Image (cartoon, rainbow, N blue to C red):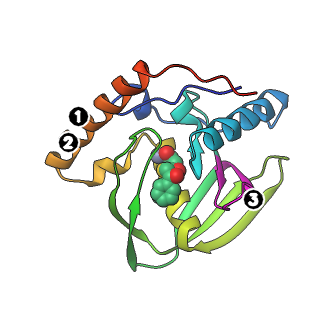
Amino acid sequence: MLLPILSYPDPRLRTIAEPVKVVDDEIKTLIKDMFETMYDAKGIGLAATQVDRHIQLIVMDLSDDRSAPRVFINPKVTPLVEDKKPYEEGCLSVPDVYDKVERPAKVRIEAIDGEGNEFTEEVDGLLAVCIQHEMDHLNGVLFVDYLSRLKQTRAREKVRKVVKQREKQPVTVKA
Ligand code: K1U
Ligand code: ZN
């Protein structure tokens, strides 16, 4: 099932997510729906906050062919280096807005996967960027918060236009 994605500046995007208590069938259905929603929106990541579910759950797929789905439940992310790298970020909750954000280049992720198993991983590159972006969502933070006030105002205007345009478009039904 496709889930509606909240758009900036919706105040629900500022909600702090609660830890997941148990990886049960309800969570597994949400994970499935979040993947469907993320793939449909052509994203590489999605936090539960963005679909108005305020629990610590992230889905991600950095592959070109949707072959590498990843689930992060109750993630803890620790920077491993002081060195910060800029990356041109986008966000499904801030459509058509892209800008450079600097984040630590290497991080440790401690999380639970979609089957309820704990894992630890040290990552860099796009995975490090994306997990920090998604962690921010779970903490009510958006990448535009790192930009100037002027850029935030422009982003709000841009999103308002995109949402208005999308509302005008006819709904397409997939076979
Ligand atoms: O959290 C989100 O809204 C998903 C977001 C993840 C992300 C992309 C790039 C940098 C950091 C986090 C997106 O998937 S944005 C849309 C997108 O497909 C994309 C944008 C830039 C590069 C790669 C993909
Ligand atoms: Zn985002």
Q: Is residue 68 magenta?
A: yes
Q: Where residue 14 sits: x, y (%)?
A: 40, 34
Residues under labels 3 and 2: Cα distance?
34 Å
Quadrant position of the N terminus in the picture: top right
Instruction: Tell me the element at label 1.
Output: helix
Residue type, numbered disc 1:
Glu
Residue type, numbered disc 2:
Arg
Work out whether residue 141 can be spotted.
yes
- Relative depth, front residue between 112 and 98: 98
The residue to which callout 3 is attached is: 68
Classify residue 54 by image quadrant.
top right
The residue to which callout 2 is attached is: 154
The residue to which callout 1 is attached is: 157
Q: Is residue 72 magenta?
A: yes
Please report contact status of discs 1 and 2: CB closer than 8 Å, yes or no. Answer: yes
Q: Earlier in the sequence, mark 3 or mark 1?
A: 3
Q: Residue at x 69, y 69 (%)?
A: 121
Q: Residue at x 77, y 51 (%)?
A: 113
Work out whether residue 56 can be spotted.
no
Instruction: Tell me the element at label 2.
Output: helix
Residue span colored magenta: 59-74
Q: Where residue 104 sits: x, y (%)?
A: 44, 71
